[in-house]
Image (cartoon, rainbow, N blue to C red):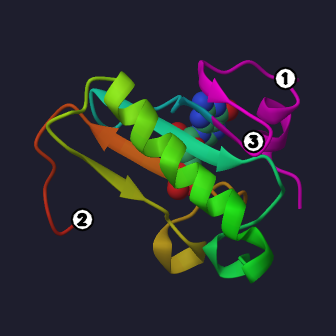
Amino acid sequence: MSSIFSKIISKQIPADILYEDDLCMAFRDINPQAPTHFLVIPKKEIQSMADLTADDQAIVGQCLIVAAQVALEEGLANGYRLIANTLEDGGQEVPHLHFHILGGRKLNWPPG
Ligand code: 5GP
């Protein structure tokens, strides 16, 4: 199922893109929940964590490495949180796998 993120990947709608390669893309969240809040997504249309297969190993690995690199570039050397909201109970709204990276303030635990 295509989502708004497919339109960001194809540049049909704009986003503040921080990083892009053949496998993934990082861009700022339009509704930031912390001083720094960006998303890392695979370019492949994968709906959620629940849809991952062993074939996606390289994609997910690259997404996490990009998340760590962009976090440092964004000045999050003191730490950050990486979250993948998954399906209904996880509070996932956009049905395209994405990793939230939040930082720039002390984050509470546990999340709601
Ligand atoms: P979810 O609740 O699915 O884990 O998070 C989806 C995230 O995508 C939300 O934080 C929301 O603000 C962000 N988002 C939704 N639509 C857009 C958009 O068009 N552009 C950008 N940059 N972020 C979006």
Q: Is residue 32 visible?
A: no
* Closer to us: 33 or 8: 8
Which x, y percent locates residue 62? 61, 51
Which x, y percent locates residue 42? 71, 51
Q: Amino acid at mark 1?
A: Lys
Magenta span contains residue 61: no
Q: Which mark is residue 111?
A: 2
Q: Amino acid at mark 2?
A: Pro
State how many labels appear: 3
Residue labelled 3 has its Cβ within 8 Å of some atom of ligand 1: yes
Is residue 1 shown left or right of residue 46?
right
Asked if marks 1 and 3 touch (Cβ < 8 Å), the reply is no
Quadrant of the rendered image containing residue 40: top right
Q: Which mark is residue 11?
A: 1
Q: CA distance from mark 2 to mark 1?
A: 32 Å
Is residue 111 shown left or right of residue 31?
left
* Residue interval drawn in magenta: 1-25
Q: Residue at x 53, y 28 (%)?
A: 30
Q: Which residue is mark 3?
A: 5
Q: Which mark is residue 62?
A: none
